[in-house]
Image: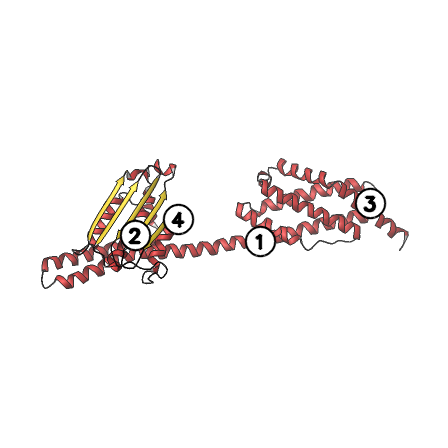
Amino acid sequence: MSCTERASGDDAHGLAEELEARRPEILRSYADNLRAAGSLISRDPHSLDQAIANAEQILKDVTNALRANRVQVNEKYKLIAWDIGATRATDGIHPQESLEAASIFFRTALAAVTELVGPRPESLNALTVAALTLEQSIALRVRESVSSYNSVLLNRVREAQVEERRRIARDLHDRIGHGISVSHHQLELYDIYRDTDPAKATAKVETAQQAIRESMHQLRAVTSGLHAQEPLQNLEEALHNYLGTVADEQLTVRLRVNGDESWAAPATLDEVFLVVREAARNTVRHAAASMLLINIDITPHELRASVEDDGRGFDPLDPPVSDGVGVASMLERAELLGGRLTITSRPGSGTRVDVFIRLAERARHDPN
């Protein structure tokens, strides 16, 4: 090894020791510079802690490169880079903020290294190694964090697509399937009454026609997305209208809606109507019940609903699969409202569906 090479190596080792000693000071300056620049990263404690931890690893890369007298980056940089990308995607921090933070750190660290080197020409090689390592470590981390950021967004897109498909399935089942089911039921009754009671048979056909027209309207609303703009205004009236289309002489129905419906937002009432209607529909179509009791209590703070029948019931450990979409739809709608839905049943002892929803303060004062 030549004298020049030894001197260069000594300078690099010396710079590494000085840089390591000044690491806490550099990290403090970096944090201060982020705040001075108004970086969103500096406003969130967790994001700031991640940025400082990342910067500390970069400085370690630089000191290790100086000791080895060559540019090198620890491969474990990917671990924290992935975490940073995922965190910033979750927090809604744009990659531009990460690039600006990286630029701020590069300037902060390079200024410190340049100050330590001073005007010594023999330290030019050490300065070059430090600068190149600094740039490479930052660039690799930015690349990995952006890749992680994009992965989170892609997963969000996929989840949104899945949720949209589930929403469409719920709406098709609850809003359109209901009308088709009513039409089918009324036409069955028409066949029963057409010879013995023509007037009643004619009424059943008219009800079936009305249900078909309503299904066509709901189909247009679902396909255009307009149904969300027309929330239910009167829960009790809507349930009475529905029960009037499905009840028959063999089923005794009682409906009670207690409290002030204005305490719940119209959109909440709309979702509750769909849940209660689906539970009642299951009773009418599958339970072979003689009694259906629907009770809804609305207070300023919560809404509770129950749908109970004395039908055939079922074993909760072995539920029927004839209407899995309907049950799943009820559960999902309750969850989307931040509530919960429970189903209690036993073979030969009927079924009870309970819904609980906590009403938000803002919803109770929402004029819409």
What is the C-alpha distance between the residues marked 3 and 4? 61 Å
State the residue lying farthest toward the right.
Answer: 3
Q: Earlier in the sequence, mark 1 or mark 4?
A: 1
> Which mark sits nearer the N-terminus, 3 or 2?
3
Residues under labels 1 and 2: Cα distance?
A: 46 Å
Tell me the amino acid under the disc marked 1. Answer: Ser
- Helix, strand or loop under label 4: helix
- Mark 3 or mark 1: whose residue is earlier in sequence: 3
Camera-side mark, 1 or 2: 2
The residue to which callout 4 is attached is: 336
Marks 3/2: CA–CA distance: 78 Å
Tag 2 residue: 352
**Which of the 4 image quarters holds residue 118?**
top right
On the question of residue 11 being in view, the answer is yes
Residue kind at label 4, given as amino acid type: Leu
Q: Is residue 325 above or below residue 259?
A: below
Dot 3: element: helix
Label 2 close to label 4 by CB (< 8 Å): no
Q: Position of residue 259 (x, y in %)?
A: 27, 38
Q: Secondary structure at mark 2?
A: strand
How far is the residue under mark 2 from the one under mark 4? 21 Å
Q: Quadrant of the N terminus?
A: bottom right
Q: Provide the residue designation for mark 3.
A: 14
Q: Which residue is mark 1?
A: 148
The amino acid on which the numbered mark 3 sits, given as a three-letter code, is: Gly
Circle 3 residues within 10 Å: few <14, some 14–19, many ≥20: some
Give the distance between the C-alpha atoms of the residues marked 3 and 1, in whole angstroms.
Answer: 37 Å
